[in-house]
Image (tube, rainbow, N blue to C red):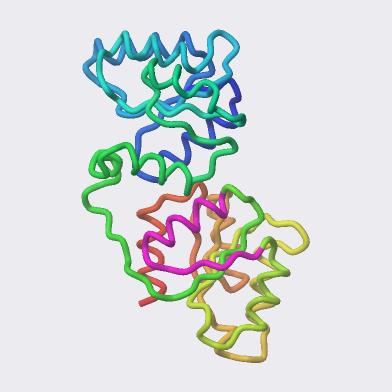
Amino acid sequence: MVDDDFNTCDSVSYMLQQIGMRAEWTLSGKEAVLRTRQAMMRNDHYCVYIIDWFLPDMNGIEVTRRIRKETGGDAPIIVLTAYDWSDIEDEAKEAGVTAFCSKPLFLSELRDCLHSIVNADEVQEGSGENMVIPIGTGRILLAEDNVLNQEIASAILSDAGFCTEIAENGKIAVEMLKKAQPGYYQLVLMDVQMPVMNGYEATKHIRGLKDKELSSIPILAMTANAFEEDKQEALKCGMNGHIAKPIDVQNLFAMLSKVLT
């Protein structure tokens, strides 16, 4: 991943990890070329490059051209841009660009792009041979205020066969659950730190609902706070389990299987 914006590198690398790829990033085009050379010397080749079009030291097309010269191979190279790329498309293809993706980049778009240009077996190579993916047919209520986290969690759950509905904060999650028929949602994935009403407060409201079937719905906490006291707080307010962020996919699936069966 090559982009001079740290946040873009961080978020895209995280998305790549979520779909089973070992991600590395750099803020410089020149360093990307150097890392490519070092990877070739180690015989540990990169299987995909994702490069921003505008970089301070050289543009994405020039980086692509130099990487092609270093590797002599056909590893897919995706160029990211927030602008119309039609004027440079011919030059980009001649330099060795495989595909373009628009910024801001979301997980669903990244997945579609990767699967369209890379053998699916290669994309899944790092995902773990022993990963058990539950096959779900139910609906999950996701309480999460961060758009990127919403996108990632929804894609993961969709792969497992679940439908996902999103609440941007705890208060909305409580209202959505109160309006739903018992059994409409199988489970609530509840972020802890949210505006208006946090996950702990929302869980207490849900546990206090008069309808016993609604009030007893399984609720899993999702939080970057993974200390023992955070887990205890989640259990104390009535949650059924605790999932640390960033989400470990195998751990999430194991928890879902445990709670739903």
Answer with left or right where residue 236 lies relative to residue 29.
right
For the image, the number of numbered tags is 0
Q: Which of 70 and 86 is in front in this view?
A: 86
**Furthest-right residue in view?**
196
Q: In which quarter of the image is residue 24?
A: top left
The residue depicted at 58 percent of the width and 74 percent of the height is 238
Position above or below: 241 against 123: below
Position above or below: 129 against 38: below
The residue depicted at 54 percent of the width and 18 percent of the height is 27
Query: What is the magenta range?
Result: 149-167
> Considering the image in quadrants, where does the C terminus appear?
bottom left
Magenta-colored stretch includes residue 209: no
Position above or below: 13 against 28: below
Q: Quadrant of residue 53?
A: top right
> Considering the image in quadrants, where does the N terminus appear?
top left
Q: Which of 51 and 14 is in front in this view?
A: 51
**Furthest-bottom residue in view?**
211
- How far across and down, in percent of the image, does residue 102 sit? 55, 36
- How far across and down, in percent of the image, does residue 106 sit? 53, 44
Magenta-colored stretch includes residue 155: yes
The residue depicted at 43 percent of the width and 68 percent of the height is 162
The residue depicted at 58 percent of the width and 88 percent of the height is 181
Answer with left or right where residue 154 lies relative to residue 257.
right
- How far across and down, in percent of the image, does residue 250 sit? 35, 54
Answer with left or right where residue 63 lies relative to residue 226.
left
